[in-house]
Amino acid sequence: MEIAVIILHGLLSLIAPAGFALDTAIESNIRRRFVDAEVIDVRIDNTPTHQLLNGKVDRLRVATRGIEPVEGLRIAVFELETDPLNLDIHRLQTDTANFRRAFRQPVQGAMRLVLTEEDLNRTLSSPRFASRLQQAVERISANIPGAGQQNYKLEDLAIDFLEDDRLQLQVNLSGTDTETGEITRLKVQIETGLVASNGYYLELIEPEILLDDRPLPPIVADIVSNALGERLDLQGLQTDGMTLRLLQLEIERDRLELAAFVRLEPEILPTAPEE
């Protein structure tokens, strides 16, 4: 999750020339990295000044409300709590572009994220994300038998959080026949459970798929479910040196809550070649 890296960088980069940073200064540094933020609260716990001077921090905690890391994506709640930190303060101050080089040990912690139904629907309708969703529609429709003569366009999409960790997705599509130019419109409804599985996947549970209010044939429903499932493999979000493991996912009537473990490894400097 790139947002965890942004916040960690904002936290660590202000362990300042005086040897430590005020919470308010760190909060301001993080706020500058977002498009918008309603509330950012940072706490440095149980850390004497002499430990900060040596780059040791017992725990950092950050709690945010209403942050917008990129245009069109609002996150209702994001919280991060780290394990003890051990940093090279001089390198942290002089090599801000490669801040993982300042780690004397891995930086890890737990994070909690909450998305509301209203915010998520606003995000899905924004231009930035609509183009990505259109690409997903094209990939899925290309694998549906009999759909090869149609070019499908996403018209709108809405998500509805249900009880018992289930959600419903409604997608309206327009299809243009590649030979006749005739336009047809389709309504696709997907209701499914969603759970965290093996730390890296969001697994669909008992998905039900309707096309214009009629159940899809099992073979087509399986193709659509498998195509959607491939998009829920979160290992692609991990970058070199970062591990992300899902711990819990809960869906309520108006919100989705996710808990995860994140770990950033130190970046090892290349050794100089021997003469």
Image (cartoon, grey):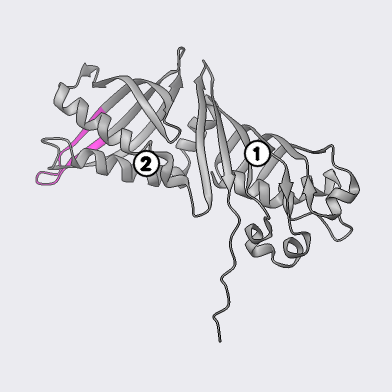
Residue 21 seen: no
CA separation, marks 2 and 1? Answer: 23 Å
Residue marked by disc 2: 133
Identified by mark 1, the residue type is Ile
**Circle 2 SS class:** helix
Whole-percent x and y of residue 6? 63, 49
Of residues 197 and 273, the one nearer the viewer is: 273
Identified by mark 2, the residue type is Leu
Relative to 199, residue 142 above or below? below
Whole-percent x and y of residue 100? 63, 57
**Circle 1 SS class:** strand
Instruction: Give the magenta part as a residue range.
Output: 174-186
Relative to 130, residue 32 above or below? below
Relative placement, left or right, of 118 versus 86 is left
Residue 14: which numbered mark, if any?
Answer: none
**Label 2 crowd bin: few (<14), some (14–19), many (20+), radius 10 Å:** some
Q: Earlier in the sequence, mark 2 or mark 1?
A: 1
Relative placement, left or right, of 168 versus 6 is left
Residue marked by disc 1: 67
Of residues 139 and 90, the one nearer the viewer is: 90
Residue drawn at (51%, 21%), measured in percent from left and top?
Answer: 250
Residue furthest out toward the front: 274
Residue 62 seen: yes
Relative to 109, residue 209 above or below? above
